[in-house]
Image: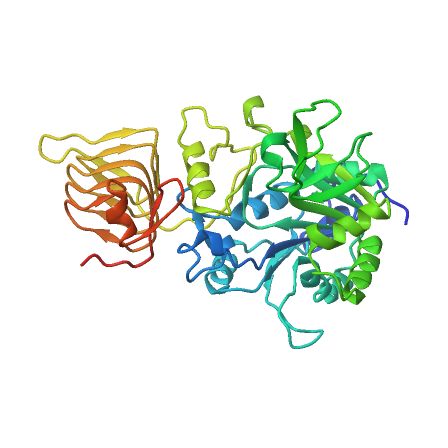
Amino acid sequence: MARRPVCDSRPNKRAIGLWPPTKLWHTLAVLEMGSRPKVLSVVLAGGEGKRLLPLTEDRAKPAVPFGGPYRLIDFALSNLANGGYRRIVVLTQYKSHSLDVHLSRTWRLSTMLGNYVTSVPAQMRRGPQWFLGSADALFQNLNLVADEQPEYLFVFGADHIYRMDPRQMLDQHIASGAGVTVAALRSPRSEAHQFGVIHAPTGTKIESFLEKPADPPGLADSPDESFVSMGNYVFDVEVLLEALHSDAKNKDSSHDLGGDLIPAMVKQGLADVYDYSSNVVPGDHDHQRGYWRDVGTIDAYFDAHMDLVQPLPNFSLYNDQWPIFTLGRSLPPAKFVTDGVTPPHIENSVVSNGAILSGCDVRDSVLSPNSRVDLNAKLTKAILFDDVSIGEGAEVNRAVIDKNVVVPPGVRIGIDRAEDEARFTVSDSGVVVVPKNYRFS
């Protein structure tokens, strides 16, 4: 297939202004479609998220709140939308109601140029079965590819925290002639055994894809680091179709992208690696380049929040050149109240709209919309979801409190581990999780 270079798609506004208004949409569509390769983006959002329980008790993992008003899926979708790839299919499966509602309310793109974000549940088009794996999820939805007829397909995960300009990854993919390009993160070799590791010793061509190897191979330019897969891919569609049909016929396959499809493509010499550390995002500072967090466990989820509250964070929510989009609730601004003689003390914290903090002490914490913290309450490294209230004199330390929880006055959370374990989920590192709608007796 002949491949066209990616180029600037911005239309000539002066020329467009000469056309009758009724032809404006058609002109924009022609310019949009003719100036860059045709790309369809697929976001895999069917994960069950068992390691994030109880946060995933009644919601899909990509729908878990993060950083105040956001959901995890907003980060992948924002990267694609900011990059100009706005024809996006979200494949869902488990407990998808809140995710579907969020997508329908938040991600309503203009249809003038054919842009859309749409959720697609498991349709069982190829028989009465759920998705057997991520590769099978693509295989069961090949009708979407047939309808759109793209040249290239982005396949992104839905539950990582990062900023990435996908245009740069596609540029490399097209230039290389690869069938698939796998985005990879540089990781210390001592930690790489936890992930799928990519071995590309002589440039970008992947020679082997190793699933959680005991002795990960180092990089040629940095022997103490290894490439680990981020779970983001760009495929040549013709090559992908052949690979998916071959995988579907393989009875020994688990039909997983990272476990089966990519290793098979590596053996055929079709796979290249994209070094995520080379990706430059507008508005990010040098120390923020290459930030990526898999928030698949409570501890990783908590640590990613603590990254947000640092004075100079490695990941900032405030980059207006590459914003993270979400649905904003119609709430008044946050308010800080001196209750009687006690002024509030707020330090290194993210406080969302609608929050009211009265004479309290809040440090290194993230407060979601409509939070309430009363007089003499103390929060240290606390993550509050929407509509959480902390009563007078209560103390919360290293804890995640899900929606609609009212913490009574004087209650202590995250202070006595034995007491917490009797009531709540407590992670390996001691992070306490209070589930949604919990009622204290």
**Side (left or right) of 368 relative to 242:** left
Q: Residue 375: horizontal and vertical position, in percent?
A: 15, 39
How many labels, in total? 0
**Side (left or right) of 410 relative to 438:** left
Residue drawn where x is 41% and y is 60% of the image: 57
Farthest residue to the front: give it. Answer: 214
Residue 414 lies in what quarter of the image? top left
Residue 14 lies in what quarter of the image? top right
**Side (left or right) of 270 relative to 15:** right
Location of residue 246 with respect to 32 vertically, above or below: below
Asked if one can make out residue 434 in the rendered structure from this viewpoint, the answer is yes
Farthest residue to the bottom: give it. Answer: 128
Of 375 and 212, nearer the camera is 212
Q: Residue 54: horizontal and vertical position, in percent?
A: 39, 56
Q: Residue 241: horizontal and vertical position, in percent?
A: 81, 59
Of 24 and 199, nearer the camera is 199
Location of residue 311 with respect to 244 vertically, above or below: above
Asked if one can make out residue 179 in the rendered structure from this viewpoint, the answer is no
Of 217 and 285, nearer the camera is 217
**Side (left or right) of 10 relative to 37:** left
Q: Residue 288: horizontal and vertical position, in percent?
A: 55, 27
Residue drawn where x is 69% and y is 76% of the image: 127
Of 419 and 262, nearer the camera is 419
